[in-house]
Image (cartoon, rainbow, N blue to C red):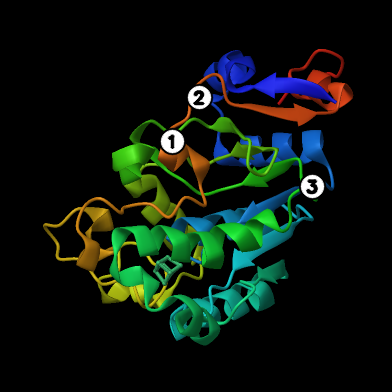
Amino acid sequence: MARFTQADLVELNKAFEDRSPADLLRWTKDIFGKRVAALTAMQKAGSVICHMISSMKINMNVLFVDTGVNFPETLETQHRLAQAYGLKIMTLHPEKTMEQQTREYGVLYLTPEGQKHCCEMRKTEPLLATRGDYDCLIGSLRRAEGGARGGCPILSVDPSMNCVRINPLANFSDEHMENYIAEHSVIINPLHSQGFSTISCNRCTTPVLPNEPKRAGRWRHLGPWSVYCGINPTDLGGGTSLAIDLPQELIDRLLGRTTDFSI
Ligand code: SF4
């Protein structure tokens, strides 16, 4: 194993700025082979990634964290995507049901500190249970979402999962996404047409008004200090010193040192 840092990705990130999401998905599969999966919360951008994976016939697992308190529409979307696109969706579960958690800790999501603990137990820890299974996770963050995602890198390192994260839609504008969805009749979560600009657990997500920020419906009851759950590490900042450990051979391939993976 060798150390691999965010700084090692600077040149590759620059080179990838002009690549299409399809190019980036193909590159990811070519480099990471079986050790890559897509992570989606069954929101609009995740549906676009699922459609691209399916239409490009890329064989990979899709991971979905079912917190146990998702909206029925979200679970229905998961089922529809799996059926229509022939996807292998692996559902990850928290250790405790919401009832067990509430008996033990009380209603956590009502305070900022409790929310962090609840999101750790119900979102982050189920994903962490897969640590070691994948060298790369594909996400669906877009810079057009604004906030902490306004400058999200295409490639980043995730020390918690010890893997590379790639967001092929980082440069996908709202217009790009809506056009792609319309052109391909992509299956999307019906909550989006009910005013939900982003979607998470039913306890902590509300629709937003047309003049509100896109993420105003997340943890509305807590105010502006709790705007990200932490399952996507670039939301929480980081920097060029973040590091993971990967096989040297994989690092060489990733950086194009030994293999011609021109795309
Ligand atoms: S979004 Fe709310 S209910 Fe869901 S894990 Fe986070 S705090 Fe808990």
Across and down, in percent, residue 203 comes to 35, 77
Tag 2 residue:
17
Spatial CA span between label 1 and label 3: 29 Å
Across and down, in percent, residue 182 comes to 42, 61
Q: Amino acid at mark 3?
A: Gly
Mark 1 vs 2: CB contact within 8 A: yes
Circle 2 packing at 10 Å, graded few (<14), some (14-19), many (20+), is: some
Q: Is residue 76 above or below residue 188?
A: below
Tag 1 residue:
171
* Mark 1 Cβ inside 8 Å of ligand 1: no
* Mark 1: secondary structure: loop
Residue 132: give its label: 3
Q: Quadrant of residue 194?
A: bottom left
Q: Is residue 217 above or below residue 21?
A: below
* Mark 3 Cβ inside 8 Å of ligand 1: no
Residue 203 shows in the view: yes
Looking at marks 1 and 2 on the same chain, the residue that comes earlier in the sequence is marked by 2
Residue 261 shows in the view: no
Residue at image location 70% in from the left, 38% down from the top: 162
